[in-house]
Amino acid sequence: MSNKDIEVVTQRLRAALEALEMAAERRIDGDAQTSSLADQLHALAVDRSRLADDLDNAAARSKRLENANREIADRLDIAINSIRSVIAVKDS
């Protein structure tokens, strides 16, 4: 093998090693992005769960407020009717 052949083979080997190094870097970057996406997906799932709990709590609170409002309205109706009865008896 001549020096020129060795030089050509060496250049090809360097090019192959550079290509391998670049492929490894792309793989590492891809793995990092995949890991980052997995972390983001996990964070979104946690947020979704928290928001679902918050929504359930808000719906339950809304229902309690509706019931309290209905009870207050019923009591006011009773009080108004009682006052009207007293006024009607007084006017008679």
Image (cartoon, rainbow, N blue to C red):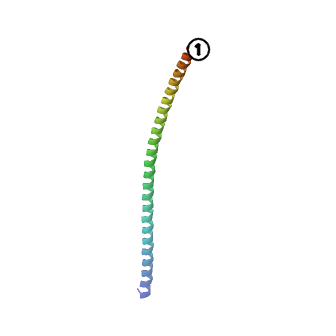
Q: Nearer the viewer, residue 56 or 81?
A: 81
Mark 1: which secondary structure?
helix
| On screen, residue 73 above or below 52 | above
Tell me if residue 16 comes above or below residue 50 in the rendering.
below
Query: Total of numbered circles in the picture?
Result: 1
Seen at 45% across and 83% down, the residue is 8
Please identify the quadrant where the N terminus is shown. bottom left
89 relative position to 25: left or right: right
Q: Residue furthest top?
A: 92
Provide the residue designation for mark 1: 91
Which three-letter amino acid code belongs to the residue tagged 1?
Asp
Residue 58 visible in the shown view: yes
The residue at 43%/45% (across/down) is 50
Tell whether 39 sits left or right of 88. left
Side (left or right) of 80 relative to 36: right
The residue depicted at 44 percent of the width and 41 percent of the height is 53
Residue 5 at x, y percent in the picture: 43, 84
Q: 77 or 15, which is in the foreground?
A: 77
Viewer-nearest residue: 19 or 1: 19
Location of residue 35 in the rendering, given as x and y in whole percent from the top left corner: 42, 58
Which quadrant is the C terminus positioned in? top right
Q: Residue furthest right?
A: 92
- Up the image or down, 29 lies above or below 79; here it is below
Which residue is rendered at x = 49% and y = 26% of the image?
71
